[in-house]
Image (spheres, helix red, strand yellow):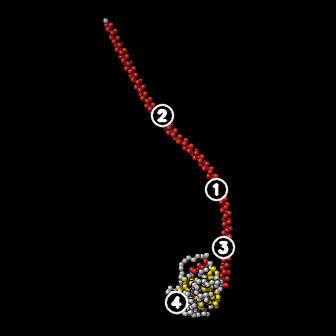
Amino acid sequence: MACHCKLHTDRTILTAVIGTAVIGTAVIGTAVVFYVIWKSTKEKEDLQKQNETFKQEKEKVEAEKEDLQTQNDSLKSEKEGLVKEKEDLQKQNETLKQEKEKVEAEKEDLQKNYDRLKIENESLVKEKEDLQKQNEIYKEEVEADFKELRRKTNTCGYVLGREWKPITEARVNVTLDPDIATPSLTVSEDGSRVRFTGDRSAEWPSVLGREGFTSGKHYWEVEVGEKGYWVLGVSTHTHEKSIPEKPGEGYWFVRLVKGKTCTAVSQSGDQILNLEKICKVWGVYLDHEGGRLSFYNVETRSHIHTLEGSFPGQVYPIFSPGSHDKGPLIIQRVQHTAVNVI
């Protein structure tokens, strides 16, 4: 009985031990299972994270690849453009090179032409200077001969513009002085006209200008019209009111008688002027220092005659309308107009 009890007890203990062992084993197995599951889950999560990272990196790489492809396409286009521009520049360079060669050739031709023209121009300048010198010599000779011929012959001659201009630039307004005029003469209020209003006689009643001249050059113009008798000139006799038929010293004038006989009178003697026609407007030019009193046909601008001598001191313009008709002598007033030089 006792043995039976003991056996039962051992079995119970063995069963407990075995149960405990089984339970321990089961617990260990469960722990192992849980560990394995945890580890698998963690590895899965890590793998998922890595997969997401790889996916993001892949997407980034894909984006970078697309960007690089775009840049590559752009660079390719730019390269093609640059290649085309290079070709165009090479063509332009060839064209410019050809044009440069052409320009260089033209430049050489122009330089040759310039050198030739320079030599020709220098030659022409020298010829021009020589011709100018010859022209001046011929001009001086011709003018000298012309003046000498005019002086010797006292014939009328056209006055060139370069000679006429200084004459007319010396023009003055001569005013008649009624206080020293012969009573048989009537002087206008402005002193520009004088006419004979007395009885006909053989005398030469006269009137002087108010202003006398002791130096310089002076020019005035007188309209004689159709008058048959008159005297124009200068005188040093300030108190005589008539001109002697045969004046002595102190008179230089031209006198017209009967509308046809024109005589130049001075202390050197009388000289009849052979004029084809008596002009209606006379110019009187006094060169005091030069000792010359010249007369001009204003209408044709021609020289008529020149009286030469020495003027002692002050001389006055003198006028006589004669004593045979009532026509006036009219002093033309200065009009400030340009003188045409021919």
- Percent of width and height locating residue 220: 56, 83
- CA distance separating discs 4 and 2: 136 Å
Q: Are marks 4 and 3 in contact (CB under 8 Å)?
A: no
Which is nearer the N-term, disc 3 or disc 1? 1
Viewer-nearest residue: 17 or 259: 259
Q: Are marks 4 and 2 in contact (CB under 8 Å)?
A: no
Q: Amino acid at mark 2?
A: Lys
Quarter of the image that includes the N terminus: top left
Is residue 237 visible to us here? no
What separation in Å lies between label 3 and label 2 (alpha carbons)?
102 Å
Asked whether 284 or 325 is in front, the reply is: 325
- The residue sitting at 64% across, 90% down in the picture is 270
Q: Which residue is mark 1?
A: 103
Neighbor class of circle 4 (other Cα within 10 Å; few <14, some 14-19, many 20+) is some
Helix, strand or loop under label 4: strand
Amino acid at circle 1? Val
Q: Along the polypeptide, which appears first: circle 1 or circle 4?
A: 1
Q: In screen coordinates, is 19 left or right of 264?
A: left
Nearer-the-camera pick, 79 or 59: 79
Amino acid carrying label 4: it is Thr
Label 3: which residue? Answer: 132
Lower position in the chain sequence, tag 4 or tag 2? 2
Q: Which residue is mark 2?
A: 58
CA distance separating discs 3 and 1 = 41 Å
Tell me which amino acid carries mark 3.
Answer: Gln
SS category of the residue bearing label 3: helix
